[in-house]
Image (tube, rainbow, N blue to C red):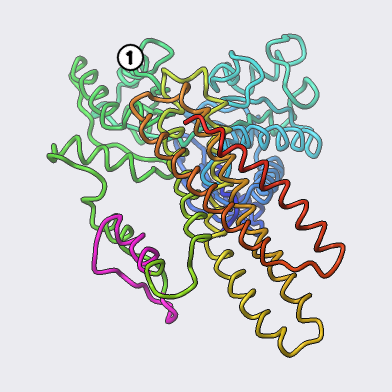
Amino acid sequence: MPTTLVECVPNFSEGRDPAKVDAIVEAMKVPGVYLLDREMDSDHNRCVITLAGEREAIEEAAIRGVGKAAELIDLTKHQGAHPRMGAADVIPFIPIDGVTLEDCVAMAKRVGAEIAKRFQIPVYLYEAAAASPERQNLENIRRGQFEAIRDEIATNSARRPDFGEPRVHPTAGATVVGARKALIAYNVFLNTSNVDIAKKIAKAVRFSTGGLRFVKGAGFLVRGMAQVSMNLTDFEQTPIHRVFEFVKREAARYGAVPVSSEIVGLIPKAALEQAAEWFLQVENFDSSLILENRLAAVVSGKTAGGGFRVEAVGGLRAGIEPFIEQLAAPTATPGGGSAAAASGAMAAGLAAMVASMSRGKKAYLQSESQLSEAIAQLSVLREELKAAIDADAESYNEVRKSYKAAKESVDGNKLVAAALRQATNVPLGVAERAVEVRRIASELKPITNPNMNSDLVTAIALANAALEGALANVEINLDSIKPESAEDEAFVAETRVRAATLKASVEGLHR
């Protein structure tokens, strides 16, 4: 699995020539990047490509796609229902795993600068990457489309690009690059060809003209039907079913009804679960009632044969029970060191959950950057602490092996000392990470939902347990080292200082 996972959904101004779209997709084939979806629409004359991959790889894929689009698409000859300003019209980056929205902002800036440098295409930054509030909304940047930008870019300061010279590429226009949360491109078709009705509904539903928060909308004539075309920028706060019901009610005012709707690109599973709960009116619904979700919860891992092992017990217990039973078994590993690491990982997970459930909410918008930073740090800490669960057991096993090997080697004490140093470093690292988790969890209290305070208290308690348990393992390993060299003596002395500093933080706890 990639260590970082970013989604990129470039929109290109070509929806009628499959060969051109194939060539653009081919240009974006970079190792570490995966094609998830491609959509073409001849009426809009636009295609949407959905990619996912590692951070650096997906940056290069996006840049190459822009370059190929500039070769193949001539905006002076382009016509379509959808507004456009560039051959590669918009390039958004969306954080998925191991990255934050701020990371994607940095990606957008790097990619924007490189596009301007390689292809002489001016670039504007939008959404979270915007340099000014008026450029957060894409429609503000794209107003008047390619032709208006071409005419004004050199003389109107509001049209100056963020990267590149103040002149459009003669055939590829300009490109918008940004960072945002997962977006749902959602269109509703009406049983009328009167596009004015779609435009009136779009005006009513979009936030910029008094409608629903996190909705952008416009009206078009597509396939002979009036279409309300929308982008839902935060489906958790403005769910898709609410948008559909709003459009349906507004359409009724003009004697029209929705006949179908479509998703352009991909949609998060949670959005469909919300819609199912709403329209089916299922009592006490939650996602664990879905068969596939329940199966995923009880699948505890792959067996040696490559299949899946499903535990007899269900729910959350299935995932943790094997580890607890291993701790209870009459074997030396896993032991206290692994348990301490697991406690730290759970603490990081709980704190990340609290931060994630507050980020993006209206009441905590002023703390958005702090919450994003906390989530990013906790993600790294959680992974490192999870890795330490096995690392602690492995280091102990290496110590046992070194004692056996020492009986047959003239350098026996050196072998043992080396193994003990490693066995000491693992819990020391756990202790240091536990301190960081505890610090972040404490700092989250004033900037997150107070109803989740008990989760943070639990996270802090788990971090404290991880810290104390890990320090106990450090101490017992240091006591076992019999220095054979100046290196050993320096290691013991330095480690005792580091451990004492961490221990002092335990003794001065403020929970």
In the displayed structure, does residue 230 sit left or right of residue 438? left
Few, some or many residues within 10 Å of mark 1 (<14, 14–19, 20+): some
The residue nearer to you, when weighing 140 against 127, is: 127
Does the rendering let one see residue 182? yes
Q: Is residue 77 magenta?
A: no
In the displayed structure, does residue 194 sit left or right of residue 34? left
Residue at the (58%, 54%) spot, across then down: 22
SS class, disc 1: helix
Q: Position of residue 89 (x, y in %)?
A: 60, 33
In the rendered view, tell whether residue 198 sits above or below residue 424: above
Q: Position of residue 351 (x, y in %)?
A: 46, 38
Residue at the (49%, 60%) spot, across then down: 336
In the displayed structure, does residue 469 sit left or right of residue 299? right
Q: Position of residue 225 (x, y in %)?
A: 31, 31
Instruction: Give the residue type at disc 1.
Output: Ala
Which of the 4 quarters of the picture holds residue 195?
top left
Does the rendering let one see residue 14? no
Identify residue for label 1. 204
Magenta part of the protein: which range?
303-325
